[in-house]
Every structure is written in structure tokens, then in C-alpha cells.
Image (spheres, grey):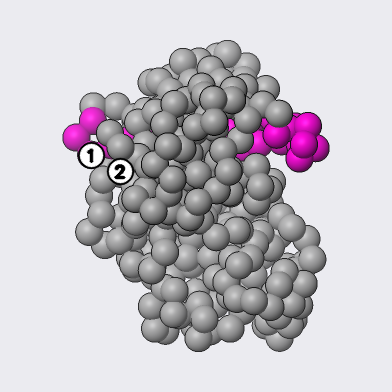
Amino acid sequence: MNHVPPRLDPAKFRDPFVTAKGEVRASVGLSALQTLWVNTGTLCNITCRNCYIESSPRNDALAYLTLADFLPFLDEIERDRLPVEEVGFTGGEPFLNRDLPAMLEAVLVRGLRALVLTNAMKPMRNHAAALLALRDRFGPALTLRVSLDHHDPALHDAERQEGSFAIALDGLDWLAREGFQVHVAGRAGFDAAGEAAMRAGFAALFASRGIPIDAGDPVALMLFPEMDAAVDVPEITTACWGILKKSPDSMMCASARMLVKRRGAARPAVLACTLLPYDPQFELGATLAEASRPVPLNHPHCAKFCVLGGAACSR
């Protein structure tokens, strides 16, 4: 499968072990599995212009992952005493998956934290009773991270769809009012204003609505770099760690893995990363143990989003 986008230098990201210049490609070992991500399915209630996973009301390339699919991985964590602290649920829109509340309960009852990435629109509100029950039992161990691309409604709606900002903000208001632990995810490169201005704009929005989120906290308000796999980026070599003064242990794949269930598959697969659900070279196995091997940084997202962008999807 040719996973290299057409505008990218075709010599790059071909060999998992050697760069186009013949240098040793950097890889990242799993130092400790702290975060397990679960893709609940690629179906979403809206279609965004630049969704990296191409979620939509029609894209079911990743099928709904069920509670029965999920429980063996929780059992493996418990049996092998893996150092997992948090399980994150992403999609698509996770609340379209009817098993999500049961999967959240299965995580929380084991003493792990749970994180849900949501657009806070109608699918989430359809699960209001189940969410309130989980809040009552587990409190801040459950976090909901709401996607607001920008604090300006027009800019958010240009990415997602007209009127989506108002609906998402209403959902965020409800979560805050009901005492949930809430975070927000925006996009750092959405306009030329810069990160400081973005955080100031979000701070004003949160203050005007009484939403208790510290916009200066990089976890409570995560601003993700843009992801365009067709933009030419440098390949990451083993020498880059010293040049950039970064450690492989700071990369997302040093502490995280993701479960997906491909359409038509009999069982889930474990992937290296939340950002690369379709690239077969990042499929590592059928169990967490099988998926503990090192990950070669052989994709533009590895370079731009993680190494150069410094982004991670968990706390």
C-alpha cells in the first residue's frame, strides 16, 4: 500500500529503518503503556473539512468497537499489571457507539481514568442520563474533552458546519453546569493570531459562560498543530533527538497505543498511534503484549505533529 501523499517528496517515508538520505530512521520504544486509546468507530454526526480520520455520517471504515471487543484488553491490563492510568475514547463521535457508557463504566470501576473526545452535540446529549450516573459514581475520574476549533463561531463553523459552534457550546455549558470534569481541544494554527491570542480568546469565552476551564493550562485547553500529510516535512533520524533536545520517551507512542476494529474484521487490532488508523505499517498486533515493540517514525505525522509539533493526545 502506498501511504505517501502525492505532494510529498516521494523518496521520503518509504523505508521504516532508513531515511531517503540513507540515515538511520528514529524509532520510539514503549517505555510504559500509560494511555490506551479506543477508537469507537469512524462514524460521526457531522463532516469536518480537515478531519484527519475522515469521519462522517457515512465512513464506517472503522466499525463500532463493542464492550465484548474491549473487555479482553482491560483483562490483559489487570492480569499483566500494565501501568495503564487512563483510557481515552475517540472516533468518529464516540457517543454514536451505544456501548460507550458501558465501556466507560468498565474502565472507571477498575480505578482507571476515562477520557472522551466529543463534539458535545446531540449524540452526547442522548446519553445524558448515563453520563450523570457515571458522574455521580466516579466524579472527576471521567473527563470529557470538547472540540471547539476556535473561540470565534464563524471560524469553528467554517471547519465543521454552520451552526455547530452554538450546539457544541450548549453541550459544553451543560457539562460545566452539571459539574463534569471538562477540557477543550482547539487548533493552534487555525489563524495567524498565534497561541497567546488563541488562549486569550478562549479565556474570554469561558469567562463569559462561567465555564471553569483555565485557558492557560495546556491540558485543560489543548491546541493541536495542523495535520497535513501532504506538506513536505523532514524525516526524523536518530541524530535528531540530540539536535532538537528531545527524548524518544516524550513521544506519544512511548506511552500509548490505540484499539481499532476494521470493518469486516473478526477482532480489534492494536495500533501505534491515534493519528494513523489506516496505515498498515502501524498495526502492531492483536494484544497489548504484541504491540509493545518499537515504532519507526515513518510517517509525516510522526515528524510534524509529534516530534516537531510537540503534540500529544493525553495528559
Is 33 placed above or below 305 here?
above
Query: What's the residue at 65%, 42% (across, down)?
Result: 307
Is 156 placed above or below 285 here?
below
Q: Is residue 128 visible?
A: no
Image location of residue 286, percent across then percent down: 38, 21
| Helix, strand or loop status at disc 2 | loop
Q: Amino acid at mark 1?
A: Arg
Residue 258 colored magenta?
yes
Image location of residue 8, percent across then percent down: 42, 49
Disc 2 and disc 1 in contact, CB within 8 angstroms: yes
Is 15 placed above or below 117 here?
above
Residue 166 colored magenta?
no
Query: What's the residue at 39%, 53% (across, down)?
Result: 7
Query: What's the residue at 25%, 54% (across, down)?
Result: 59
The disc placed on residue 241 is none
Q: Label 2 crowding class (10 Å Cα cut-off): few <14, some 14-19, many 20+? A: many
Compared across the picture, whether 291 is left or right of 181 comes to: left
Query: What's the residue at 63%, 30% (across, down)?
Result: 237
Location of residue 226 by image quarter: bottom right
Nearest the viewer among 79 and 1 is: 1
Location of residue 264 by image quarter: top left
Residue holding disc 1: 263
Question: Sequence order check: which comes first, mark 2 or mark 1?
Answer: 2
| Helix, strand or loop status at disc 1 | loop
Nearest the viewer among 235 and 69 is: 235
Q: Is residue 264 visible?
A: yes
The disc placed on residue 62 is 2
Q: Label 1 crowding class (10 Å Cα cut-off): few <14, some 14-19, many 20+? A: some
